[in-house]
Image (cartoon, helix red, strand yellow):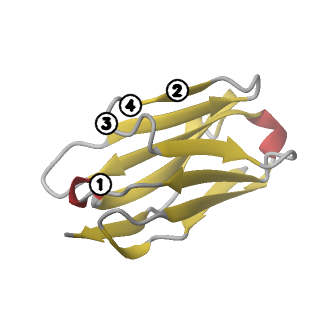
């Protein structure tokens, strides 16, 4: 099994920074990509950042240049550094692990989410 759990959300003023963490546990060697999604009130969940085992990263246009995804060397923890936050970044942020092989019938694992609120 693989489990992921987010932390680091909170309330921040516009222009500020936050760093989210995603702690992975279990059979982490089957994780081949870590993703951050977010879901704002009344909106669909959107993919905002991806990092692969090969080190490739991808970002949604809405966060490019402001957010940075990274992992530690053992892939136990993924991070999302968020700078120059805007009120429209307010959302629940979810960590998602993409798996090389499906576990329990699923090719991915989701965390419970962490709330980020950006005040104007």
> Which residue, as the protein is rendered here, is positioned at the far bottom?
11
Quickly name the residue at label 2: 58
Mark 1 → mark 4, Cα distance in angstroms: 12 Å
Q: Residue at x 75, y 28 (%)?
A: 53
Q: Position of residue 67 (x, y in %)?
A: 48, 45
Q: Residues within 10 Å of mark 1 (few under 14, many from 20)?
A: many
Quickly name the residue at label 3: 62
Circle 3 SS class: loop
Q: Classify the position of the C terminus by image quarter.
A: bottom left
Quickly name the residue at label 4: 60
Verify CB contact (< 8 Å) between mark 3 and mark 1: no
Quickly name the residue at label 1: 89
Q: Position of residue 98 (x, y in %)?
A: 61, 34
Q: Residues within 10 Å of mark 4 (few under 14, many from 20)?
A: some
First-in-chain label (3 vs 1): 3
Verify CB contact (< 8 Å) between mark 3 and mark 2: no
């Amino acid at each position: 099994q693989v489990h992921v759990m987010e932390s680091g959300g909170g309330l921040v003023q516009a222009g500020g920074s936050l760093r989210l963490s995603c702690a992975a546990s279990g059979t982490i060697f089957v994780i081949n990509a870590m993703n951050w999604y977010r879901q704002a009130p009344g909106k669909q969940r959107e993919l905002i950042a991806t990092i692969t085992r090969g080190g490739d990263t991808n970002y949604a246009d809405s966060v490019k240049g402001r957010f940075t995804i990274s992992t530690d060397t053992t892939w136990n923890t993924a991070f999302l550094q968020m700078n120059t936050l805007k009120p429209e970044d307010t959302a629940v942020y979810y960590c998602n692990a993409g798996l090389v092989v499906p576990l329990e019938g699923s090719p991915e694992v989701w965390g419970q989410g962490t709330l980020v609120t950006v005040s104007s």
